Image (cartoon, rainbow, N blue to C red):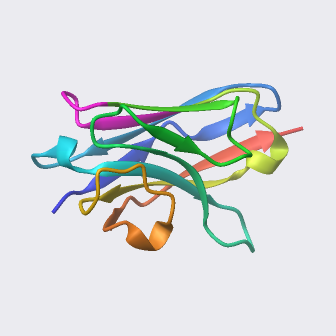
Amino acid sequence: QVQLVESGGGLVQAGGSLRLSCAASGRAFGSYAMGWFRQAPGKEREFVAAISRSGGRTSYADSAKGRYTISRDNAKNTVYLQMNSLKPEDTAVYYCAADQTVPGPVIVPRFYDYWGQGTQVTVSF
């Protein structure tokens, strides 16, 4: 089992940047494919970005391509989401998730086994 704790959220002006981190407890972090999802008020949780166990393959939602970068440091048991050129519509609670079943990247939320509590990102005009 793995526990996930997100950090790095906050309030930023449109056009700004944030870097989210997701720290995983336990061993064998490198055996989990990791993903980032977000959920805005009144909307369903949506895929943002995912990365394979080794970090060699990534996948992005169209809304994230060219602006977000997912990466991981298996030695530090941490996955990151660098978000640039933020827009007000990026406002949401951002969650990281871990999938122990496949190498990844995994874009379907129901395939993930573990979830963090989320971190709020608010982008002002």
Q: Is residue 87 left or right of residue 61?
A: right
Q: Is residue 53 above or below residue 107?
A: above
Nearer to me, 63 or 44 = 63
Q: Is residue 79 magenta?
A: yes
Locate residue 23 relative to residue 118 in the image: left or right.
left
Q: Image quadrant of residue 68?
A: top right
Q: Quadrant of residue 116?
A: bottom left
Q: Nearer the viewer, residue 105 or 87?
A: 105
In the rendered picture of this protein, how many numbered marks are placed on residues?
A: 0
Task: Say which residue appears at 55% left-offset and 56% top-offset.
Answer: 37
| Residue extending furthest toward the right | 125
Residue 75 place in picture, x, y as percent: 18, 27
Task: Out of 39 and 112, give the one closest to the viewer.
Answer: 112
Q: Which residue is pictured at 42% across the width and 61% down the height?
A: 117
- Position of residue 12 relative to residue 89, above or below, is above
Left or right of residue 99: residue 66: right
Quarter containing the C terminus: top right
Q: Position of residue 1 (x, y in %)?
A: 15, 63
Query: As drawn, which residue projects farthest toward the left?
Result: 27
Q: Which residues are magenta?
A: 73-81
Q: Residue sitting at 53 percent across and 43 percent down?
A: 59
Looking at the picture, tell me which residue is in the foreground, 110 or 24: 110
Residue 123 spot, x, y in % from top left: 77, 41
Residue 8 screen position, x and y as percent: 50, 36
